[in-house]
Amino acid sequence: MSTYRTHLLLCGGTACHATGSQAVKEALLKEIAKQGLEKEVRVIETGCNGFCAQGPVMVVQPEGIFYQKLTPKDIPYLVEEHFLKGRPVERLFYVEPASSETIPGMNEIPFFSRQVLRVLRNKGAIDPEKIDEYIARDGYLGTAKALLEMTPDEIIAELEKSGLRGRGGAGFPTYLKWKFAKASPGEVKYMLCNADEGDPGAFMDRSVLEADPHAVLEGMIIGAKTIGAHYGYIYCRAEYPLALRRLDIAISQAREYGLLGKDILGSGFDFDLEVYQGAGAFVCGEETALMHSIEGKRGMPRPRPPFPAQQGLWKRPSVLNNVETLANVPQIILKGGDWYASVGTEGSKGTKVFALSGDVINIGLVEVPMGITLRDIIFEIGGGIPDGKKFKAVQLGGPSGGCVPEHLLDTPTDYEAISKVGAIMGSGGMIVMDEETCMVDMARFFIDFCKEESCGKCTPCREGTKRMLEILERITEGKGEIEDIERLEELSRFVKDSALCGLGQTAPNPVLSTIRYFREEYEAHILEGRCPALVCQALITYSIDTEACKSCGLCKKNCPAEAITGSKKPPEPFVIHEEKCIHCGVCFSGCPFDAIKKSSGSKVARAA
Amino acid sequence: MAKLTIEDLKRIKEQVKKDTALREGGATVKITVHMGTCGIAAGAREVMDALLQEMAETDRQDIRVVTSGCMGMCSSEPNVTVEVQGHDPVVYQGMDANKMRQVFKRHVLLGEVQTDFALARMKEESPEEGSAEQET
Ligand SMILES: Cc1cc2nc3c(=O)[nH]c(=O)nc-3n(C[C@H](O)[C@H](O)[C@H](O)COP(=O)(O)O)c2cc1C
Ligand code: SF4
Ligand code: SF4
Ligand code: FES
Ligand code: FES
C-alpha cells in the first residue's frame, strides 16, 4: 500500500454534478497522470460539501484549501501550480463578497466557520461509496455498541437523555416513538426511513444520503434492535438518482461485511432492508400514506389512531423516522446522550441541518447548533441578501410552514419559539425572500402546490385548497374584495381543523402567516390595485422613461402584442400603449438601457 | 468477504485511518519538498518518491507531506524542509533519495536533526547550524 501526500476532495453532490464536477474530475485525473502524480495525489469524490452555490467545489488536504467554481480549463494550471509545485492558485479561492477578500482555507470562510457538524460530519470528508472510509471515521462502532453491549431499554434511555426530536417536521421525541413500538406486541415489526423529502427548497436529506449513507443504515439497525424489527424499508423518491445509487452501494457493501443480514457482528441479531422508490408525491411523505405506498396501494393517508407504532406497515408495529433523525442516532449511542444534549436549547437539543435557498448569497446546506437565531443563519452564514436588496421574510417549513418577517429575525431556532411566531421548524427548508417578493403571490404559490399535491381523499383539503387558491388568484389579479381576507382566514381555520392528514392541516399556514405579517400587502392589492413588490403581472403598468430611452427600438421589435410605437428616424418617442399591453414583461427585461419602468397602483385595477 | 466482528471493524478502522488521517487536523510533522522548476530539474521528484515510500512504511498518522515552489535557493536544490511541532523548521539541501530516507528515519521519526546536510534552522537561535536564514 502506498501513501498519498495530497487528497483532493471533489464534491460529487447533485448540485456540483449539475455544474460539471464530472468533467472536472476527468480533467483532474488526466492532468495528474500527465504530471506523473498518480501515486502522490488522490482524487476522492464526496457527497455534497454544503456550499452548493460555489460549485463545483473541491477541498485540498492536508492544507484545507477550498477551491470553487472549477472548470476543466482551470485544471492543467491548478495541477501544475498547486499539486506539483505547491503554489495554491489564488484566482480559484473563495472571495468574501462583503470585503472582496480572498480566503484560501475552508475553515476560515464564514459560511463554514459557524457551523457545527454532527449529522454532516462526514460530508465532503469521505468517499461515500467506500464503506472502509466510513469505518475509519468510527463507522459502525455505534451499531456494535448497541448490538453487543446495550439492551433496548438502555438505548431508549440514551435517546431520551439526548433530547433528540424527529427532524421530519413534527419534532416528536424519538425515544418515545421507539418506546411505543417496542411495547407493542408482535413477532413482526418494521423499521422505516422517510427519504421522501417533498418540500420545495429542501435538500437536507438528499445530501445526507449522498454524502453519508451508512449513517442512515446504522440508525435503522439500531432502531430495529430497539423495537425488535428484523426488516426495514427506506422510502426514497425516484427523483434522487444519486442518493439511490449511493444507498444501493452502501447496502451491498454493508451486506458483504455482514453488517446487514443474519447475526450482525456476531450479536445474534438479524436485520435487513430494502429501498422503495416513491414517485415523489408530497403526500407520500405523510407516514400512513407512505406505508400504503410501500404496500403497493395508492399513497393516501388514513385516520390515526391506530398509530403506526401499534399498526403500521401491513398492520404491524412500525417506526418511521426521517433521514436526518436516523443519521444522528449512531453518534448518540457512541458518544452518549449527554454529549448530544450539550448543545441546543432547553427543549431543542443538538444540531439542525437547514437548506438555505432563495434570495441569499450563500445558497447551500448548513448545520448549526439549535438556538442560533434566524438572523445569524441568514446574515452571518448565508452572507445576507444579494445585490444590496432588502430582506423581507424567510419561509420556514415549506408549504406546511410560515414566514418570519424582519422584526422577528432574532427568533432562535427552537421548535417552540418558531411555532410561537407562526412558522414551524419543519424539516429544515429555509427560503429567503427579498423586498421584490410579493407575499400574496408567495401564499398563492404554496396553496397552489398543496392543491396539486392533495390526494383528494378528504373534502376539506381537496375543496378548501381549491377555494383558497381561487381567492388568492383573484387578489393577485386585482379582482379581490376586502372581505376576501376574512374568507381566507375562515377557510384556513376550517381546513386546518377538519383535514384528515398533515398536508391539509398545514396547507393554510403560509396564508395565515402572510396575512398576519403582511396584511397591508393584501389590502394594497385589493383596495388600490397595487402590488407593492411589483410582481403581480396584472397590476403592473409598463412605461418608457423618455430620458433614459436611446431609441434603439429593441422593445418595439420584441413586443409580442405590438403595443409599442416609436422610431429613431424620423424621431418619434417610444411609447407603450396600455390598452394593447399584455404585461408579458419582455420589454422590461430586454431593454439594454433600463429605460422601461414598472409601476403599480397608478390606475384602479383595470380588469375589474 | 467474511462476516465482520468488532475486532475486524477496529482493524479496518486503523488501517484506513492512516490514509484518511490526512484529511483531519492533528499533524505534528510537516515535510515540504520544494518543487519549483529548478527543484524538479535537480531531482525533487525522486526525493518525493522516496519520501512517500517511507511514509507508506510507517504507522505514524501525524505526518503531512506538502510541496512548495522555489524558495530562492536554487543552487542547493532539491531542498526539503522538515517542521516538527514545537521545533524550528530545518531546511535540508542537495537532497537525493537516500538522504531523504535518512532524514525521514532519523529526523522525522526519531527527532535527530541530520546536521550534515541541514542548510539552516529557519530561526536565529541555532548558531551551530551555520549561516542562519531569517524567516520573513
Ligand atoms: C404531507 C406531509 C408530508 C411529509 N413529508 C415528509 C418528508 O418528506 N420527509 C419526512 O421525513 N417526513 C415527512 N413528513 C412527516 C412524516 O409524516 C413523519 O412525521 C416523519 O417522517 C417522522 O419522522 P421523525 O419522527 O424522525 O421526524 C410529512 C408529513 C406530512 C403530513
Ligand atoms: S429598448 Fe429601451 S432604449 Fe430601446 S427603445 Fe425600448 S425603451 Fe428605448
Ligand atoms: S409588457 Fe409585453 S406586451 Fe406590454 S409592452 Fe412590454 S413587451 Fe409589449
Ligand atoms: S453539491 Fe457540491 S456543494 Fe452541494
Ligand atoms: S389529503 Fe391529506 S388532508 Fe386531505
Image: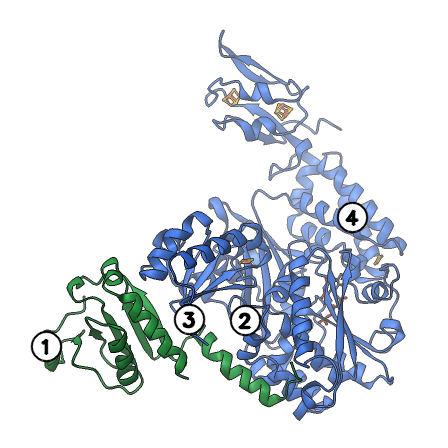
Residue picked out by circle 4: A488
Indicate which disc, 4 or 3, sits on the residue closer to the N terminus: 3
Badge 1 vs badge 2, beta-carbon distance below 8 Å: no
Give the residue pinned by disc 3: A4
**Chain on which label 2 sits:** A
Coordinates of residue A472 in the picture (x, y in percent): 75, 42
Amino acid carrying label 1: it is Gly
Q: Nearer the viewer, residue A42 or A357?
A: A42
Check contact, mark 4 vs mark 1: CB within 8 A: no
Q: Amino acid at mark 4?
A: Leu
Do dots 3 and 2 share one subunit? Answer: yes
Q: What is the chain letter for disc 1?
A: B
Residue at the disc numbered 2 = A122
Front residue (pair A532, B48): B48
- Answer yes or no: are tags 3 and 1 on the same subunit: no
N-term-proximal mark, 4 vs 2: 2
Q: Judging from the image, what secondary structure is the residue with disc 3 in?
A: loop
